[in-house]
Image (cartoon, rainbow, N blue to C red):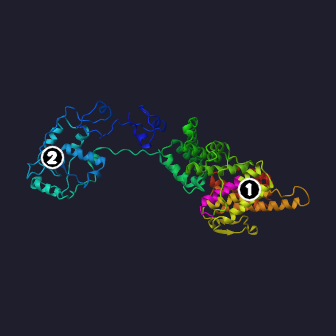
Amino acid sequence: MAKCAGCRVRHLICDTQSTCAECEKSGRECVRLNVRFRHLVCPSDEITRADYTKYKFFFDSEQTWIDTNGKLQFVTESDSSADASPTDELESNVFDAVGLDVEPRPAPVEQSSPKFVLGSTSQTPAVQASVLDDGPPEYLAALEQVPYDPPDSVLLEDASEMPAHSLREVSQLGEKLPTDTSVSYLESVLPAPELECPLKSLKEGKLLQHWVTHLAPWFDVGDSKRHFGKIATRMAASSPLLMTVILAIAALHHSRVSGQSDLYSAMTYHDKCLNIIVPMLSDSDHANDDCVLMTTTILHLYDGLESGNDLPRHLKGTSIFFHPEATYNSSQLRRAVFWLHLRQEIYNAFLYQRSVITDLNNCNFEFENESENDDMWFHQTLYIAALVSKWAFGKETSHARWYELCKMMDVWESRRPTSFDPIYFRTLDPTNGRYFPEVCYATDEHVAAAHFFYLSKLLLTIHDPNLPRIGPRMKSATVEMQKTALSYVRNLVGIAVCNNFIVARFTATLAIIICESWFTDRREQEALFDFMRETSRCSGWTTQNVQQALVEEWGWKEEQI
């Protein structure tokens, strides 16, 4: 049995059931056309029994054939019949069969072979009557009901006024005969196929647009190919799994930022996504699918938006897709997802004070490289931040490693392209109520690179092994360390406020949580609290728990909030 139309278009494996598994799974109508057009065996040759089983549409063994005198030559409108499409050939054959484009064969003149030319005749050709003796097929019978209105430039009102030899002379000169091809006979008779769209409503179309505009940039920072904004939407058109998770997170985020409390749609899409992905994970072939990989990555953000906590369980699920050689021996899509996964894992490592578990052995960079590739320089900041978390929260806490990490950061800062410099900077001024510096960058990659750079410096400063633990210098050294650390936090908040990259607000919030007890000025605390509220409003990320923790840490009373 031939493939169904849906599996044929999507290049999927189709079973032989009346409704195939792929169409049933995706909710499509399974349309199976048991017709194969094959022109590999000439019907006039001897046909074996195997040919009958392999091919269809042979002439019947008792077919009546009309004897012709001499050879027949067919004149086509195009210069070369090789350029004609299969549809054009089909229409041409149909017209000849019903007698629309056939001229009666004249008597031989000067031993020239008779020709079929474009023209209207007052008589019905003998070919028509013979071919259709047994009754025409259904589509030919329908075509007979369609009036044929030839162009005035070719046919006269009375065809008898135009001799047949004049038409033959025109065709022999090689001139094209004008004809109205704006609407073919097949198009006028056969209904146009209904376009099968991946989305079922305007609401879903708006949600997909919301994903591309507002959420995909969160994932695509440092990815010049924009896999989540461009590639994922194209893949989702044929993947119900990826489409449902995109619609789920778009519905959730839209309900948060628009103020419309419509979480039912998000929950419905989310449950549908889980029902699809759970059986797929038990199949090794589906488990390695790129759509499954992207889905688990998006689910991680969904849980973060829903609960307000960046839960690490989806990071564990995503990490199984990445072997040590993932960054070099895999596709561009998987490399992009790898760096996104590492970015999310660094955030969790700083938040929960634990080491990054991703294997970084194949992520080494040549730090003397002066390439202008912004993606590569941004990935270097991720790599350094991951190494810093491994040093600060892991087992290796040697002084030598601390100096090595500090040197790596100095090299990055001195070698990076000038495109990573701020395009605007204004220092803070607490006396005038400006508690954070104003810093603007050109692109999201530059914003994210600056944030992970300052996060790494913040952690190296706090865990400086040279700080005295006891003695008279301990207090002054600790005060100096806190002052330096708070300057990095203010830079992070200032960058997040002055740029439109929403994810920068998450890393700035992380820095505030790390150093929350060191902010003692009430007005600065209020500015930080307002920053947290605005982050929750514009990102859809619930920060209520963090705000409550800040109020308790700073000793505010409820009536003062």
Look at 85% across and 61% down and name the residue there: 477
Q: Quadrant of the N terminus?
A: top left
399 relative to 79 in the view: left or right: right
Closest to the observer, 396 or 132: 396
What is the distance, in whole Å, between disc 2 and disc 1 at their CAs?
91 Å
Dominant secondary structure, magenta: helix
- Magenta range: 370-386
Earlier residue among tags 2 and 1: 2
Look at 19% across and 43% down and name the residue there: 98
Look at 28% across and 54% down and name the residue there: 182
The residue beneath circle 2 is: 71
203 relative to 136 in the view: left or right: right
Disc 1, SS: helix
* Residue 496 visible in the shown view: no
Closest to the observer, 341 or 184: 341
The residue beneath circle 1 is: 512
The x, y position of residue 452, in whole percent, is 68, 57
The x, y position of residue 201, in whole percent, is 47, 46
Amino acid carrying label 2: it is Lys
Disc 2, SS: loop
- Within-10-Å neighbours for mark 2: few <14, some 14–19, many 20+: few
Residue 161's place in the image compared with 192, above or below, is below
- Within-10-Å neighbours for mark 1: few <14, some 14–19, many 20+: many
Q: Quadrant of the C terminus?
A: bottom right
Say which quarter of the image contains residue 242. Answer: top right
Amino acid carrying label 1: it is Ile
The x, y position of residue 287, in whole percent, is 57, 39
Q: Nearer the viewer, mark 2 or mark 1?
A: 2
